[in-house]
Image (spheres, rainbow, N blue to C red):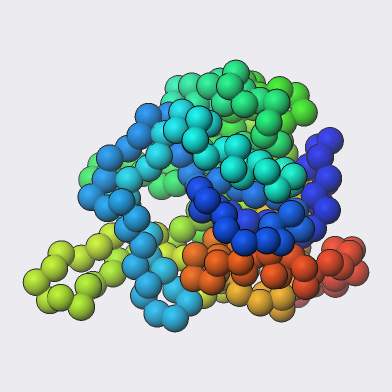
Amino acid sequence: MQLGQLTLHNPVCLSAAAWQLDGTGYERLGAIFTRTVTMEPKPGLYEEGIWQVNEQTLLNATHMRTESAEILVQEHLPALCRFGVPVFVSITAPGIPGFRKIARFLAREVGHLIAGVEVYIAQPDTEKGEELTARFVREATQAVRNELPPQAAVVVKLPPWPEHIRSLALGAQEGGATALAATNLLKALHLPDDATAAPVVGGLSGEALRPVALRCVWELAHDERITLPIFGTGGIFTASHVTDYLRCGASAVQIASGEWLEPGLSARLAAECQFTVQNVNTVENV
């Protein structure tokens, strides 16, 4: 996969990487994407806040604690860089100034260490019902792009909305994105076994997300206006799942839930998927 001046040598990437990766094989990955951080730490009701809904589906609580970019830089980034593969810092912010601030901080502190930034775009979780627009995606992407070195890649991760993802992707493209990632979490709700416990709101990931994410990748890959390479992400547990995303038009994949459920899965799949992406046939009709 080509990301501007950067070449990823394996289609399998790790997303939402644990701060301390134990084991071997991660040097085979195409890239490592960090857990999503904010400029300042965001306190939450949960330190981890990940519920296993079924065997291969997770719910990530909305009110989970988020680490700060400063802690990432000072404590965690060196450990993720030691594998010798490109590292991307995943960031999010409530508005354009927040995206600009965190991108500026990363460019100043670790611009020489990281391959780029992943701009995590999420629907606001508020009672006001704000809408996520292509204009916001464009301006957030542009704010990050303008703060980073020219060679740094900007990957924009979009929500799992097949009916709207094309317009959001065009906003990212207009803002200077290097690549797209489809998708992030699908809003969902989990009821704990304890009937007296409050419902947990959050984002669905894993197996239940895969069919939606595949459709989103297909939508992006089959829009002639969109020229950016695509990362597919959602419910990848086997080499055949990797192939499914490539067939739908992705150039690479990100593994998150699978790695959380089975540490070392991404390294194993990277070893299994040492093939040329061009040899995978793209789906022509759905």
Total marks drawn?
0
Position of 101 relative to 84 (above/below) = above
Q: Quadrant of residue 246?
A: bottom right
Whether residue 233 appears in this view of the structure is no
**Residue drawn at (28%, 40%) of the image:** 43
In the displayed orientation, state which residue is furthest to the left.
196
Q: Quadrant of residue 81?
A: top right
* Residue 46, percent from left and from top: 27, 53
Residue 17 visible, this orientation: yes
Q: Between residue 199 and residue 33, name the one nearer to us.
A: 33
Q: The C terminus appears in which quarter of the rendering?
A: bottom right
Q: State left or right for residue 43 relative to residue 282.
A: left
- Identified at 52% across, 51% down, the residue is 20
Q: Residue at x 34, y 67 (%)?
A: 51
Question: Could you say where residue 25 lies in the image, as x and y percent from the top left?
Answer: 71, 61
Task: Tell me which residue sits at (48%, 44%) in the image.
Answer: 36
- The relative height of residue 147 versus residue 66 in the rendered view (above or below) is above
Q: Position of residue 261 (x, y in %)?
A: 49, 70
| Residue toward you, 28 or 137 | 28
